[in-house]
Image (spheres, coloured by chain):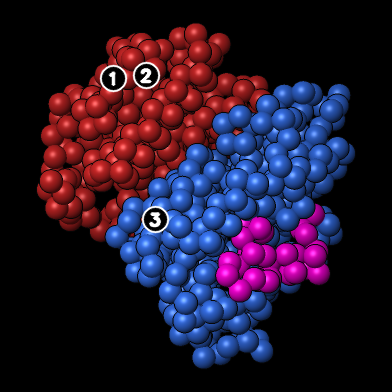
Chain colours: A red, B blue
Amino acid sequence: MAPEKNSSDLVLLDFWVSPFGQRVRIALAEKSLPYEYVEEDLAGKSDRLLQSNPVHKKTPVLLHGGKPVNESLIIVQYLEEAFPDTPSLLPADPYARAQARFWADYVDKKVYDCGARLWKLKGEPQAQARAEMLEILKTLETELGDKEFFGGEHGFGFVDAAFAPFTSWFQSYEKLGEFKVAEVAPKIAAWADRVGKRESVAKSLYSPDKVYDFIGVLKKKYGIE
Amino acid sequence: MAEEGVKVVGMWASPFVARVEMALRLKGVTYEYLREDLANKSEMLLRYNPVTKKVPVLVHGGKPMAESAVIVEYIDEVWKDGYPIMPADPYERAQARFWARYADEKCNPAIYVVYTSAIGEGQAKLVHEAQECLKTLQKALEGKKFFGGDAVGYLDIVVGWYARWVPIIEELSATSIVTLGGFSTSVTDQELPMIKAWFDRILAIDVVRETLPPRDKLLPLCKPDSDWVNLGGFWSLVAVGWIVSVMACVGSSNAVWVTAMMTWAGVHGVVLDGGWGGRSRVSSLSLTTGEGGTPLDVRAATLVVGAVAHRRRPRLECCPVVAVARAA
């Protein structure tokens, strides 16, 4: 087996409030992997970012020995496979892994975009986004069930890492959509409290107030009242 | 023992189902194929995949799973001593997953927009965008016979269906995306020789040819046969889970008809009042999608909605028009 790369070769190009970048930070923390964190200015992207992700020009980008890996969930799976002797987020059983990938993909496709429509839109389209957000939360609630984490027997896992960053956006979604996560999906709300106390998550996320302020900045930028 | 009870719930014209069958056949796994009528979804499908209610579903030893890309990785992991689908190296695996996602999120919509485009001047830009997507994707192919290297791999399985669908789309929309042919060379004067060569190579692979729907069956399905709505296109897109939203003139007889069709097909859609001349209003609407859908890029929607309804009768201003988006 080829020797593992020196993990101090890890560089993360990221943006502070990005839930996608936070997934990677959570995974790196769960695995106790040291890395260099680089804050990117999304209004003035560095040459390194543009060269590392020429297709999408987005963060997060993980550089391992200078070689770029893009897309947050792909980066997390890469960390799993490149550092197999670290605590794993994916379970060993192929069926459980397939379930985890399915649900992480569900979170990936649904949560951010629906949330963005909550702050970008008004009137009927916003109401539709709100209805969809409630449905997403209820679907995830059904999947979580009475488990402590989405990872079930495995413990804190891939889906938890994928969804945890959005817990800091719940307060914003609640204000914009006029609902309470604790009423719509109480098990998700309880899960959010639990993961929020987990060290890897606590040190990767920003406060809900800071997220709400950030949304205010985005709204100004897009010219939305 | 691993082969016990492998079932695929599928539909013959779905490229996503083809991915799963390709993977199983490469591994030499025998499976039972359960044909699903997407216009009338079975209780079995809804039980196996309550979240997205789509095909393909793989059932192994009674345990169901959905999402073709997830299923293909599962197949590779379970039958790990068989034909290698994913690359061995973690970095190469990350690249394969990246390009698969790029293809599904960017190339698929770009290609479908060409398919539904009204024949004429507006197509050049759409064809160019589809070509740009494919040119980006072909970076993963450069210098190799297949995306997987010397042999078919994960990414070939994910995008192999382009080799069957793109030529059909070129013919029906009278465009050249990959191959300069007898079609409209006024739309583009470039072709994509690397992709074209890969099309030929991939279709020469038995497993690929066996699992992709045959051209002579697929072509008539995709052909428009209605003056008002691109019916063939409508149904083929319903079949592969693409239709999520329909916009119509509330009160027009066509709206009533299309709504009835949607209900019958079990398509969850939103009927928005576009009014007369609704085409021009689409760009200011945020097209939301029904259950299981993702927000449609409004710019792409504008092009599609105008095109589908007006394909045959360009002077008509009114609805219904169909918004096409991949249901997530």
**Which residue is label 1 attached to?**
A180
Tell me whether the residue at label 1 lies in contact with that at label 2, contact meaning CB atoms closer than 8 angstroms.
yes
Kindly identify which numbered label has been placed on residue B273: 3
Callout in the foreground (2, 3): 3
Q: Quadrant of residue B174?
A: bottom right
**Residue numbers of the magenta segment:** B211-237
Give x and y (percent) for residue B156: 66, 56
Q: Tag 2: residue type?
A: Val
Residue depicted at x 58% and y 57%:
B257
For label 2, the crowd category at 10 Å Cα-Cα, with few meaning under 14, some 14 to 19 and many 20 or more, is some
How many numbered discs sit on the rendered protein? 3
Helix, strand or loop under label 1: loop
Q: Tag 1: residue type?
A: Lys
Quarter of the figure that contains the N terminus of chain B: top right
Tell me whether the residue at label 1 lies in contact with that at label 3, contact meaning CB atoms closer than 8 angstroms.
no
Give x and y (percent) for residue B286: 34, 53
Question: Label 2, label 3: how many angstroms apart (C-alpha)?
Answer: 30 Å
For label 3, the crowd category at 10 Å Cα-Cα, with few meaning under 14, some 14 to 19 and many 20 or more, is some
Can residue B107 be seen at all in this image of the molecule?
no
Position of A101 compared to B226: left or right?
Answer: left
Label 3: chain? B
Helix, strand or loop under label 2: helix
**Which residue is label 2 attached to?**
A184
Indicate whether residue B226 is drawn in magenta. Answer: yes
Name the foreground residue: A102 vs B42: B42
Can residue A22 be seen at all in this image of the molecule?
yes
Label 1: chain? A
Residue depicted at x 40% and y 35%:
A132
Indicate whether residue B63 is drawn in magenta. Answer: no
Residue depicted at x 44% and y 23%:
A138
Q: Tag 3: residue type?
A: Asp
Label 2: chain? A
